[in-house]
Amino acid sequence: MLKGLAITPPVVGRITIGRVVEKNGKRLPEKDDQFTITSQMQHASGWLLHPLDETLRKSKPGKPAGKLRSIPVRMLFNDPDLNLRAEYSLFNRKTGRPLCVGNGETCKRVTDGGITTMDCPTPDGCAYGEAGGCKPYGRFNVTIGEEDDLGSFILRTTSYNSIRTLSARLQYFSAVSGGLLACLPLELKLRGKSTTQSYRSAIYYVDLGVRAGSSLQEAITQARELNASRRSAGFAQAALDAAARAGFANGAFEDSVEESTAVAEEFYPEDGPQGSVQAETDGAGSGRPTLKDKLERKSVGLKGAAT
């Protein structure tokens, strides 16, 4: 195993709730109110859709305009923290390479002398992080379908709502199933809400639940049956978790050089605030107003008062 290279779950596709579009010669994030499943291939107009995107849309009759707002998934690992890795992350805005990654206690930061471990006071208490746009950054791997048991689709997000909700759900499902998280039949769900911060406009985040038409008790029963079947076939889930844990620990940072361009494009667009292709509280086009937005609203208010 090459040292310094994080060994991450094999990725066969991406899950987003937004997209990057070209406007005035610049590629910028644009929000959406549905999931999109893409391959890892791009062309001039964006990411190519994965065949599963069309398949799942056709399997949901009655949904408005065929919008994909739920995806049946399974977890790769029984350990919740292996399926969802979330840290406070600061990226180089031009290259997308990570400069500082921490968990609120300690962080790894790129310095002139190499990668240094130091205290992590979270973005709210870190001058370096505040100046550089440090934010929560989560990577969530799930399996879809039965074609590739170890191939995953990755959802990247900087949303507090998604990271908090997914973390809680994974911990809870692991607990109630007796640690059989990888065997539970689950589904990703897109939820919307509005807040005073979003000026009552809708913002979207990702949730995790049991599949439609099934109860939690039924899902747990299915998980036990699948676990027994896997064990009888010699499937070693504990060994898989251990291999993944060692792979993640093998590198200082999870994202590879090849992914840096996509990270920069999605989370640090050329124009506007630090954004995300995810249409959530932390994304460009999300409910969080920029300084420009606030000034424009104030200007409109003053003009209205004057008339």
Image: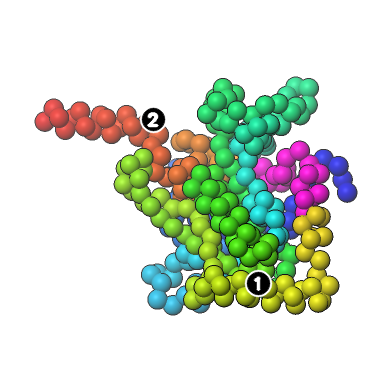
What residue is drawn where x is 41% and y is 39%?
288
Q: Is residue 148 left or right of residue 173?
A: right
Inter-mark Cα distance, 1 to 2: 49 Å
* Magenta segment includes 180: no
Mark 1 closeness class: few <14, some 14–19, many ≥20 residues within 10 Å: many
137 horizontally vs 77: left or right = left
**Which is more toward the observer, 123 or 45?**
123
Residue that sits furthest to the right in the current view: 1
Quick check: marks 1 and 2 in contact, CB under 8 Å? no
Residue 40 percent across, percent down from the top left: 65, 58
Residue at screen point 51% across, 36% down:
274
In the figure, is residue 258 to the left or right of 39?
right
Of 183 and 179, nearer the camera is 179
Residue depicted at 76% across the width and 47% down the height? 248
Question: Relative to residue 294, is residue 172 depicted above or below?
Answer: below
Q: Which residue is drawn at 67% across and 26% down?
A: 119
User: Under tag 2, what secondary structure?
Assistant: helix
Up the image or down, 259 lies above or below 221; here it is above
Q: Which of marks 1 and 2 is in front?
A: 1
Q: Give the range drawn in magenta.
A: 244-262
Q: What residue type is labelled 1?
A: Ala
Q: Quick one: SS at disc 1?
A: helix
Residue underneath mark 1: 223
If the image is split into quadrants, where does the C terminus sit? top left
- In reply to whether residue 260 is colored magenta, the answer given is yes
Quadrant of the image occupied by residue 65: bottom left
Circle 2: is it few (<14), some (14-19), or many (20+) Cα within 10 Å? Answer: few
Considering only vertical position in the picture, is 16 above or below 125?
A: below
The circle drawn on residue 291 is: 2
Helix, strand or loop for the magenta stretch, by majority = helix
The spot of residue 88 in percent (x, y) is 61, 37
Mark positioned earlier in the residue sequence (1 or 2): 1
